[in-house]
Image (tube, rainbow, N blue to C red):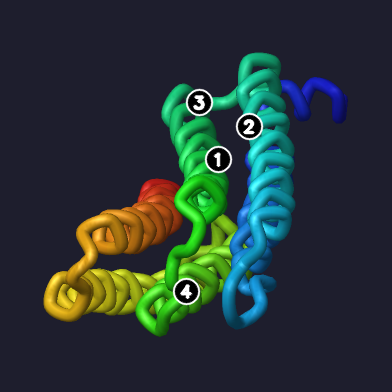
Amino acid sequence: MSGLIDLIIPREKKFFELLYKQIKILESSVNSLNSFPEGKFTSDMLKKALNEARNYEVESSKIYMEVIDSLHKTFITPIDRDEIKDISRKIHKAVNGIKKINATLYYLENIKFDEYLKKQIVILKDITDILEVAFQKPLSLKDNKVILQKIAPMENQADEIHDDAIKDLFKNTKDAVVIMRQKELYEVVEKAIDRVNHISDTLETILINNS
């Protein structure tokens, strides 16, 4: 009888366990950005960080494919299937966004790890940490409503930091190449923050739809 029940009852718990693993991978990849020491980075150091980020992306991709494969084998409503697939895809895109930060650092080199960039990465880490807590009880609207509401102000703050960074860069830097390199880094971190925020938006939608 229990086998039959397993076939007809949606298995959100199984999928959210996989999603939590993905979130932990994202958290680890973000934390790796904080491991850079103060000062100038060596090419070997940046190459190692990029390879590590690529490994995180591979791990995330494996879980994403496992989610998709399991969805095809499990009885679950079409809406639930789309929601679970979508949030797994967005987590993977966020992991990819962290890899792009590492790739930008490696390919451009000699980029200034200034206070603006540090603030951006702090916000990226803070949002990811909030998501890690939320995904411990992903379908609990009561537990997560207040938690997820903390993210929107952080994203607004990140936008302000990005705008201030670009303004300061053009105001105080004369070298066009330096401007191009530093601007690229600010923007790739901003995009990573947006991708992490998209996870929050999707989880909030799932909570509302299933409350």
Comparing labels 1 and 2, the label whose residue is closer to the camera: 1
Amino acid type, residue under disc 3 in the picture: Thr
Q: Compared with residue 45, is residue 173 higher up or lower down, i.e. above or below? A: below
Residue visible at 71% across and 44% down in the picture: 51
Q: Earlier in the sequence, mark 1 or mark 4?
A: 1
Q: Is residue 156 left or right of residue 199?
A: left
Check whether the beta carbons of the residues at disc 1 and disc 2 lie within 8 A of each other: yes
Question: Label 1 belongs to which residue?
Answer: 92
> Which residue carries the number 2 mark?
64
What type is the residue that disc 1 sits on?
A: His
| Residue 140, quarter of the rendered image | bottom right
Q: Mark 4 = which residue? A: 113
Residue identified by numbered label 3: 77
* Left or right of 122 in this view: 69: right
Per the image, label 1 sits on a secondary structure element best described as: helix
Q: CA distance from mark 1 to mark 3?
A: 23 Å
* Residue occupying image coordinates x 18% and y 70%: 174
Q: Secondary structure at mark 4?
A: loop
Residue for point 25% across, 75% down:
165
